[in-house]
Image: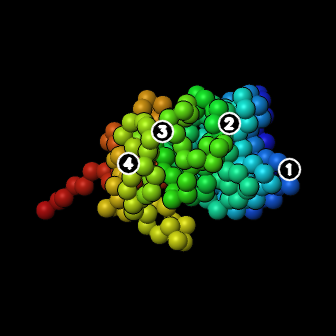
Amino acid sequence: CVLIGAKGGLVEDCTITNNVGNSSSGAGVCFEKGSKGVLRRCTIGGNSGGDLGGGIYVPTGGGGVIDDCLILDNSARYGGGFYVNGATEVTNCTFDSELYLEKEWSGGHFVNCYVSRRTIYARDGKVLDEDQDTTFNYCASSSIAWPKGVSNIKVSPGFVDSANKDYHLKKSSLLRKAGLATPLLVGLKDRDGNARLANGAVDIGCYQTPNPGLLLLVR
C-alpha cells in the first residue's frame, strides 16, 4: 500500500497493483486525514481491500488531487476502486472499478472522468442523488444517467480494447474533445506523455489523443 501522509507529497508515474489489505481501508493507495497530496499518471489495479476502498481510500477530512490515473479491477466490500469521504479533486481519470461516495462527502469534484458501468453508490445504497455535494462535470459513462452537473454524457466510451485493458480512445470515440480545458491543465501530460491541452481540446479519461502536428506536403 502507498500511504500519502497528512503533509502531502507527490506519487507520479507509478503502477500500484496486486496488493492485499486485511485492514479496513486502502489496499492500493491511502490518503491520510488532511492530506493534500497528489496522485498523478498512476495505474491502480488488482488491489483487494478489506472493508473500504480496495484501490484508493480517502477518509473524512482527506483530500488532495488525483489526476490522469487508471483505476481498474480492484475489490473491497465498499468502493472496490475508490472510496471517498473527503474533498478530493479528481481530473481526467478512467474508472473501471466501483466508486463509493459517502452520503456526507462534501467539496469534491470529478472533471473529465470516465466511469464504467458499475453504479456509483451513496452510503444508503442508493444511486448518487441530489443531496450529495459531489460534483461531476464533463464526465462520461455508458450507463449512468447523471443526476446533476454540467456537460456530462451517457455514451459508449469507444475504447480501443477495454477487454484487454487498452483504454486509449478510438478515432470515433465521443470522449474525444468532450472534456473541459482549464488553466490547471497547462503543461500537464497524459499517461503517454502527450500534452493534455492539444489545440485547446481535452479528451475525457486518462489518455489524450496526441496532436497530429503540421503535415507539410512537398510536390
Marks 3 and 1, how far apart at CA: 30 Å
Label 4's element? strand
Q: Which mark is residue 85?
A: 2
Residue that badge 1 annotates: 23
Q: Are marks 2 and 3 in contact (CB under 8 Å)?
A: no
Q: How many marks?
A: 4
The crowd level at tag 4 (other Cα within 10 Å; few <14, some 14-19, many 20+) is many
Q: Please, is residue 218 above or below residue 102 in the view?
A: below
At label 2, which amino acid type do we have?
A: Asn
Question: Which residue in the rendered view is the most extreme toward the bottom?
Answer: 164
Q: Is residue 55 left or right of residue 152?
A: right
Q: Quadrant of the image for the C terminus?
A: bottom left
Residues at circles 2 and 1 in contact by the CB criterion of under 8 Å: no
Relative to residue 158, is residue 101 depicted above or below? Answer: above
Q: Position of residue 67 (x, y in %)?
A: 56, 42
Tell which circle, 2 or 3, labels the residue nearer the N-terminal end: 2
Sequence-first disc among 4 and 2 = 2
Q: Which residue is mark 3?
A: 136
Residue at 73% across / 56% down in the picture?
A: 76
Q: Nearer the viewer, residue 186 or 43?
A: 43
**Residue drawn at 76 percent across, 31 percent down:** 33
Q: Earlier in the sequence, mark 1 or mark 4?
A: 1
